[in-house]
Amino acid sequence: MKTVDIAMIGVSASLYAIVGYLTNLGIVSPLVGVVRFWPSVIVPAVFAVLFGPWVGGVSAAIGIFISDMVHPGHGIAVLSLTVGVPSNFAGFFLVGLISRRKIRWSHMAVALILGSAALTGMIGYLLSIEALATDIAILFLGVLFACCAIAIGIGLWKPEWKSYGIASIIGLLVGSAYIGFGLWVYSHFLPLPLALGWERNAPFYTSFLWLVWTFATEIPFLIALGPPILKACYRAFPSLAPQVEE
């Protein structure tokens, strides 16, 4: 790892924690709590694209740990190290890795179809067992399909952003899945904070709630803010434009 990469890990981790603190609105996932509304995901995503997967993944892992430990974070190191840190590392490592690959439309179609089908199925299941209100389910579905449409539209209008769009969707989906199922497993060993009744032995369907909430509330920031921020960075520092690999 280059010296500049280590420096950028420090910058990204610090910005991630600071922006997370400044944008904290006290909003957590409905019914089961714990997972915060988190627009600051755009910070490690941008650094992952600019400086590569290791910078994105490591900085996100460090940044989320700092954020978890500082008020209004939950302050539980074990929870952060077992769920928050690895989920952030995996998600933003993938953003940095996939954004530097040449994505074909066939790849994008498969990823969007599988991802949308999985999330729609989860939302439908939660709706069927009355774990999710109809209006919230409709809102989540609207966000999901709107972001897919925006990703496709950007890919058609500006093909150079196609890889970033699919990288954001896949990376965030993997990170969200880790958070959802990780919190469910954690609850069977140690109590969760702010869980509103599911502190211990959370039922399996809560993993879907955490997953859907995390993805639906964070993907709009990655899809909408990523391209203009990255474009501005490329204009200011042309050398940062990544070389797309086959």
Image (cartoon, rainbow, N blue to C red):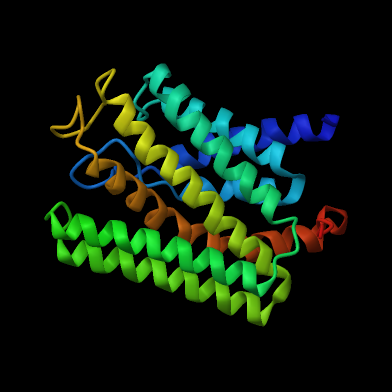
Q: Count the marks: how many?
A: 0
In the image as oriented, which residue stretches furthest toward the bottom?
157
Locate residue 86, reporting x and y percent: 52, 31
Q: Is residue 138 above or below residue 158?
A: above
Q: Residue at x 35, y 30 (%)?
A: 72
**Left or right: 28, with 87 as reference point:** left
Instruction: Name the one closer to the observer, 202 or 106.
Output: 106
List x then y, in percent, for residue 22: 45, 41
Q: Position of residue 196 (x, y in %)?
A: 15, 34
Which residue occupies the foreground of this view, 69 or 166?
166
Q: Quadrant of residue 76?
A: top left
Q: Residue 116: horizontal and vertical position, in percent?
A: 42, 65
Relative to 85, residue 240 above or below? below
Quarter of the image with the C terminus is bottom right
Q: Residue 236 appears in which quarter of the rendering?
A: bottom right
Residue drawn 59% across the image and 62% down it: 166
At horizontal 33% and vertical 51% (from top left) the residue drawn is: 213
Image check: 89 left or right of 99? Answer: left
Instruction: Classify 14 as above or below 144.
Output: above
Q: Is residue 134 visible?
A: yes
**Quick check: 197 left or right of 21?**
left
Query: In this orientation, does residue 224 appear?
Result: no
